[in-house]
Image (cartoon, grey):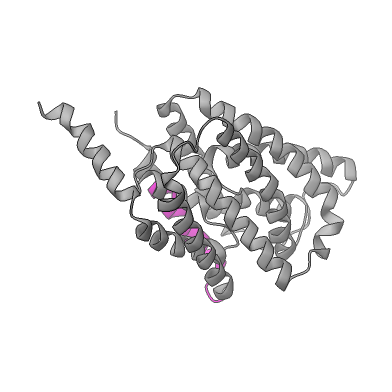
């Protein structure tokens, strides 16, 4: 008699947790700050929190994460537009457009793929992607901040490579609900030889249409029929993420980014396994 009652208790507990906007805000601020410190939005760390602490199913957590990501990107673009110039990204426009083209294709297809996967398959896929992002952060912590471009300077090579890299970016974005900066920035720095500041600006320009397409696709599939997360989770989490990102940006340079990426990469792997590696 105890087994049938267990899921009901779990559902009630999750429901109560979801309706704590204060909790969503309190978690979002430090996550946003850590993301701001290393030049990311922190969405890869929000996803385990949404599916773990706040109790959303993985199918709910991904589109919710996309909404917060889009709001955070828009705020970052507005802030960057007032403090920095976008002129440095103009020579990079062919690369940016090719990355956007590839990313939009798989952002569109990635949502359809997520709909075809079973819950278990989707959780396994997300686990693999999050572990990959965590490993990438760890590896990046040992690499120099600026190296010569690995790709030839020929425009044709750059456009083709941009489309291929964009395909990977869009898939990760649509399946994890992230902006993709954890892939975009290293790609721009190491493959195309872009300086870190310009890569940060270009990353936002690439992420915005990619996340928007993924979000529209999820919305068309009925991901937001339930409006309660808008008030209870998305609003407080978006506010907290923007505040955290601003704090992180102000503190950038005080904490060594390489040491922080190493630590966060390890934390991301641990949290991904705890949330998405479900025992059978």
Q: Is residue 122 left or right of residue 208?
A: left
Q: Is residue 83 left or right of residue 271?
A: right
Q: Residue at x 58, y 27 (%)?
A: 112
Please identify the residue farthest to the left as the structure is shown. Answer: 1
- Whether residue 53 is visible here, answered yes or no, is no
254 to 40, vertically: above or below: below
Residue 157 falls inside the magenta stretch: no
Q: Residue at x 47, y 36 (%)?
A: 225
Locate residue 25: give its quadrant.
bottom left
The prevailing secondary structure element of the residues shown in magenta is helix
x then y, percent, for residue 84: 74, 70
- Judging depth in this view, the residue of 280 and 18 nearest the camera is 18
x then y, percent, for residue 149: 78, 53
Quadrant including the C terminus? top left
x then y, percent, for residue 259: 51, 65
x then y, percent, for residue 126: 48, 37
Q: How many marks?
A: 0
Q: Residue at x 76, y 39 (%)?
A: 101
Q: Residue at x 65, y 32 (%)?
A: 108
Residue 268 falls inside the magenta stretch: yes
- Judging depth in this view, the residue of 183 and 18 nearest the camera is 18
- Whether residue 17 is visible here, answered yes or no, is yes
172 to 37, vertically: above or below: above
47 to 114, vertically: above or below: below
Quadrant including the N terminus? top left
The magenta region covers: 254-271
């Amino acid at each position: 008699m105890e087994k049938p009652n267990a899921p009901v208790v779990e559902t009630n507990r999750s429901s109560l947790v979801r309706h704590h906007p204060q909790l969503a805000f309190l978690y979002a601020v430090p996550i946003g700050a850590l993301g701001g410190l290393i030049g990311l939005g922190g969405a890869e760390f929000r996803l385990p929190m949404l599916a773990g602490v706040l109790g959303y199913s993985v199918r709910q957590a991904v589109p919710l994460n996309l909404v917060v990501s889009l709001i955070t990107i828009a705020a970052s673009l507005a802030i960057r537009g007032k403090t920095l110039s976008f002129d440095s990204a103009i020579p990079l426009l062919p690369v940016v457009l090719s990355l956007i083209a590839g990313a939009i294709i798989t952002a569109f297809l990635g949502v359809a793929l997520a709909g075809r996967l079973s819950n278990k398959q989707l959780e396994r896929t997300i686990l693999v992607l999050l572990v990959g992002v965590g490993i990438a952060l760890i590896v990046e912590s040992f690499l120099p901040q600026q190296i010569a471009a690995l790709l030839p300077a020929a425009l044709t090579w750059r456009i083709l490579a941009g489309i291929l890299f964009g395909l990977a970016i869009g898939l990760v974005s649509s399946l994890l609900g992230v902006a993709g900066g954890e892939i975009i920035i290293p790609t721009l720095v190491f493959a195309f030889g872009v300086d870190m500041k310009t890569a940060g600006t270009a990353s936002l320009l690439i992420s915005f249409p990619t996340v928007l397409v993924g979000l529209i696709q999820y919305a068309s599939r009925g991901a937001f029929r339930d409006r309660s997360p808008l008030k209870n989770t998305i609003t407080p989490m978006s506010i907290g993420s923007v505040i955290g990102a601003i704090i992180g940006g102000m503190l950038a340079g005080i904490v060594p980014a390489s040491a922080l990426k190493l630590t966060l990469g390890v934390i991301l792997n641990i949290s991904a396994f705890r949330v998405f590696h479900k025992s059978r």
